[in-house]
């Protein structure tokens, strides 16, 4: 049996595409009635940067323990929680990328108007930071991966003749 490999980039891309599609449809429906695209606050950007930074700090500590250094504050439970937080951060970043891209797509047909073009830039900046959050989550997930021990090398390989080992 192959060990669980964690969150894959393809899952994040599909999540971002699904979110972008659904959000674009919803925003088109809302804006067709005369409403404007919801305004964007900068607090979301601050939160994403803070979360990404906290993920990297926690992940770096787990990586040091994994590589054999002693860090007293890192327990196995904390390492597992760091891994789960990294995966959640990756999916959160992916969903936010989809949301911000959908907003950009709704504003894009009017990009020749200066006021609309000025509204696109903040969404673009937020989308880039959300992608960085997803990237930080994937990096920390990699840092949390336990390397196989030398004596475990053959246990994870499937049998070649189709019969189970005993």
Image: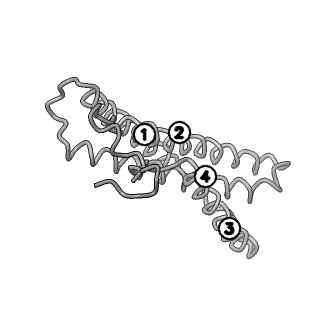
Height in image: 95 above or below 129? below
The answer to whether the residue labelled 2 contacts the one labelled 1, judged by CB atoms less than 8 Å apart, is yes
Q: Nearer the viewer, mark 2 or mark 4?
A: 4
Q: Quadrant of residue 149?
A: top left
Residue 16, horizontal then vertical, whole percent: 60, 55
Residue at disc 4, secondary structure: helix
**Label 3 SS:** helix
- Foreground label between 3 and 2: 2
State the residue at coordinates (42%, 39%): 52
Most foreground residue, 89 or 11: 11
Residue where numbered disc 3 is placed: 27
The numbered mark at residue 132 is: 2
Left or right, residue 135 beside residue 100: left
Does residue 66 appear left or right of residue 129 in this picture?
Answer: left
Callouts 4 and 1 close, C-beta under 8 Å: no
Measure the C-alpha gap from mark 3 to mark 2: 24 Å
User: To which residue does mark 4 refer?
Assistant: 13
**Contact (Cβ within 8 Å) of mark 3 with mark 4:** no
What number is the disc on residue 52? 1
Q: Are marks 3 and 2 in contact (CB under 8 Å)?
A: no
């Amino acid at each position: 049996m192959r060990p669980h490999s964690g969150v894959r980039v393809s899952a994040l891309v599909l999540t971002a595409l699904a979110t972008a599609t659904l959000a674009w449809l919803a925003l088109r429906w809302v804006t067709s009635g005369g409403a404007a695209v919801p305004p964007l606050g900068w607090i979301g950007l601050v939160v994403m940067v803070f979360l990404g930074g906290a993920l990297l700090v926690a992940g770096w500590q787990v990586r040091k323990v994994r590589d054999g250094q002693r860090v007293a504050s890192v327990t196995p439970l904390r390492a597992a929680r760091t891994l789960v937080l990294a995966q959640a951060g990756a999916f959160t970043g992916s969903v936010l990328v989809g949301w911000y891209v959908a907003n950009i797509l709704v504003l894009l047909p009017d990009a020749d108007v200066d006021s609309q073009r000025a509204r696109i830039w903040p969404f673009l900046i937020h989308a880039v930071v959300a992608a960085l959050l997803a990237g930080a989550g994937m990096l920390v997930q990699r840092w949390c991966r336990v390397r196989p021990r030398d004596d475990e090398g053959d246990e994870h390989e499937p049998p070649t003749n189709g019969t189970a080992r005993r």
